[in-house]
Image: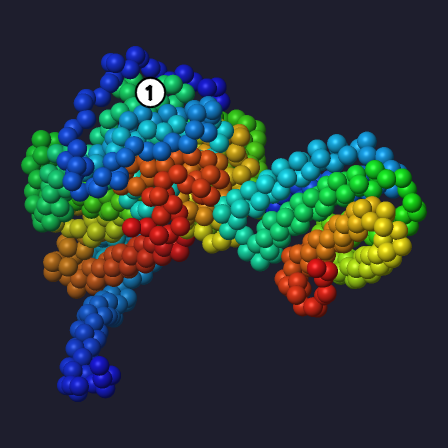
Amino acid sequence: MPIVAQNPMARVYSRFMYALCIAFALLIIGVLVLIIGYLVSIGWRSVSVSFFTENPQPYGSGRYPGGMLNGLVGTSVLLAVSGVVGIPIGILAGVYLSEYSANSKLAAPVRFVSDVLAGVPSIVVGILGYELLVVPLGGYNGWAGALALAFIMIPIVTRTTEEMLRLVPKSYREASVALGATKARTILRVVIPAATGGLVTGIMLALARVAGETAPLLFTALGTRLLTVNPNQPFPSLTKQIYNYATGPYKEQKELAWAGILVLISLILVLNVAIRLLSQRRGAR
Amino acid sequence: MTPAVMKTIPTAAGAPAAPPPDFDAPDRQGQEEKKPPYIHPELASEQSLLTVENFNLFYGQSQALHAVSLNISAGKVTALIGPSGCGKSTLLRSMNRLNDLIDGVRVTGNMTFKGQPIYDRHTDVIELRKRLGMVFQKSNPFPMSIFENVVYALRIAGERKRRKLEEVAEKSLRSAALWDEVKDRLHTSALRLSGGQQQRLCIARAIAADPEVLLMDEPCSALDPIATAKVEELIHELRGNYTVVIVTHNMQQAARVSDYTAFMYLGRLIEYGPTNTLFVTPHLKETEAYITGRFG
Amino acid sequence: MRHFEELLQELLQKIVMMGTIAESMIQIAVTGLVKRNQSNAVEVFLKEQEVNRLQVEVDDRAVKLTALQQPVAQDVRFLFMASRIGGELERIADQAINIVQNSKHVLEDPPVRPLVELPIMADVAQKMVRDSLTAMIQRDVNLAATVLEEEKKVDAFRNQIFSRLLEEMKQDPTAIERSLSLILIARNLERIGDHATNVAEEVIYWIQGRDVRHSKGTTKAI
């Protein structure tokens, strides 16, 4: 067989396709740079110390427009509560899918429902929260918001947990069982510790996802301009505060909303980078 | 560890159902394989620790082991050899019921450990596995420290005394000829050890559970010759204190390390006898053809 | 020590044991001749059986170790050497038996003339056996080489004894039977020297991998 190229067009075609792929890859990066660049250029002027230390102030007050301390605290509390509820449920369901479902007829439905849940629009989750937790409790409250967020987290954590546990080599399980360990001990002492890095990645991913949610909070936590850590009443969040100010009439408030977006994006970016670093460390081990 | 008594009941109660029809046996496998296995008379004088009797194993519809009967001699090294797919690993994994982890496995026939049935509704599988330690083809230390790997069996047994754990760790690592290499870094990750060290760590981990039998499933297939030689030396040293059953696709290894060798083919036992007889003057021409590499 | 090395060591000890017994057989046979007392002859025969048994054992071990341990380099040379040396030592033992048997005819007649060269020749041959074994135990190539040199000495002794006894036979026909037996014994001793030489050559092959068996064109008696 001759090793000299028979068809010179083949090489041209190959190069063209290569260039096309590179072009679109750059396009994706370009879009992200554009968004972040735009945000930074508009938002950085409004990010000040008072953004982090003050609550929103009404028009006319001496400290107008204030900051978004209430939103930062509110989002943190919401994330904490939703995490406490959603992460254990998600992990246990993931453990079931990965470790116990081999012969179970329940596995396929659980997996399917979990996938559907992950795809449910977040506004639907918000309305569900409204019907189940706001109406019966007689008013907007932080619990409803946190649970709505937890509801979004669960399928994400479930599926990443399942994937991560499946990545743990079968040989670990065999070795443990061959040493006389029960299945539960094997999972607790060997499988889950071996997958810790992956599990943390999944959790961070879920937290980053819900940190940016607004829709489910609209009908549940509602939001407030006040700083509060009491989830029994309407509860502030960064996203809702941004939503309110961005749709409001005042220039100063719009600028504060830009600053809020910049802070939120930065937080999510930091979370993502942290996830990357974590998974890299896991890979290197 | 105190030798706990496995719960047993008269075998009749747990007796398995009659073997299903042997679909592929009559035609596809020639007359030669249907001959009864040749068991060398020297085995008769050995004390049997683990007895396999007319043992059949099925993966779904396909039969992996056909009426295998053999005795594993106490305190000796027994090698199972044969071409890939001959059932040697399956037989080994049946001994500590590790095949239970695989779906659709069915067995018929008897297997006893010290006279107690291994396949019985009332067998305490956890206890069984503690007494038949296993070393795998690929070294599989847990992603923990060297120390935690070794004491794993004690930890799951609920041992908390630090002194006891340290004592067992040292003793086991010494038995596995690894102590001098790792004594200064017991609390570093086991995954940083070399392949050969990892495999010896796995042997130490199995020894720490204080088993009576060590089942080794191709323990050197992923090791370089130097590491292999070390593990083989170790097997020589374990002889006597432990009963070792080793599966190996490396006939030379079987020749080097074992006292007895069982040659298997297509799920059947073909010939079983003292290694130094089987490898010098095998009784059957099938065995001779396989060990001389003139197979088929 | 590695398990395999232990097994090799055991085999070496078997050979040494064989050699020690064969050497003592020469000693007893020659002493019996010189002292004109064959009361120890039975012992020689018993020892020969032991040597035969050991030869079979050495060969069996060598074959099994070759089959089971896949020896290479000096290990495989050692195993071949072991088997061949076993053969040489077994023949040395046979020669000792022959000396005992040939001595019978000598002792039937009254002594005519004191044996002078024969005991010295026996000493040399015996020393060759001992040195070749020592060379093996100590892995001493130089000592093995001296054994090769000694062979000439043994040959010279044999020639000397042959010509002297021929002379005697010519002068005194009644001494023919006795002298013939002595000639045979001299030849037995010379053969022992040959076998010891072969042992030394095997030792050199084992240690250095050099086959010196036919390199010097040594003249061997027929």
| Residue at figure coordinates x 28%, y 59% from the top left | A269
| Residue at figure coordinates x 83%, y 42% from the top left | C106
Task: Report whether B277 appears left or right of C220.
Answer: left
| Residue at figure coordinates x 70%, y 68% from the top left | C216
Residue A95 visible, this angle = no
Task: Report whether C205 appears left or right of C106.
Answer: left
Residue A166 at what x, y percent from top left? 26, 45
C43 and B207: which one is in front? C43
Task: Report whether A61 appears left or right of C123.
Answer: left
C110 and C40: which one is in front? C110
Tell me the quadrant of the picture where the N terminus of chain C can be found.
top right
Residue B113 visible, this angle = yes
Task: Report whether B284 appears left or right of A71.
Answer: right
Residue occupied by mark 1: B117
| Residue at figure coordinates x 48%, y 32% from the top left | B76
Give the image quarter of residue A124: top left
Residue A250 at what x, y percent from top left? 15, 61
Indicate whether B186 appears above or below A42.
above
Indicate whether C40 appears above or below A209.
above
Q: Residue furthest right?
A: C113
Residue B137 at what x, y percent from top left? 38, 45
Indicate whether C171 appears above or below B184.
below
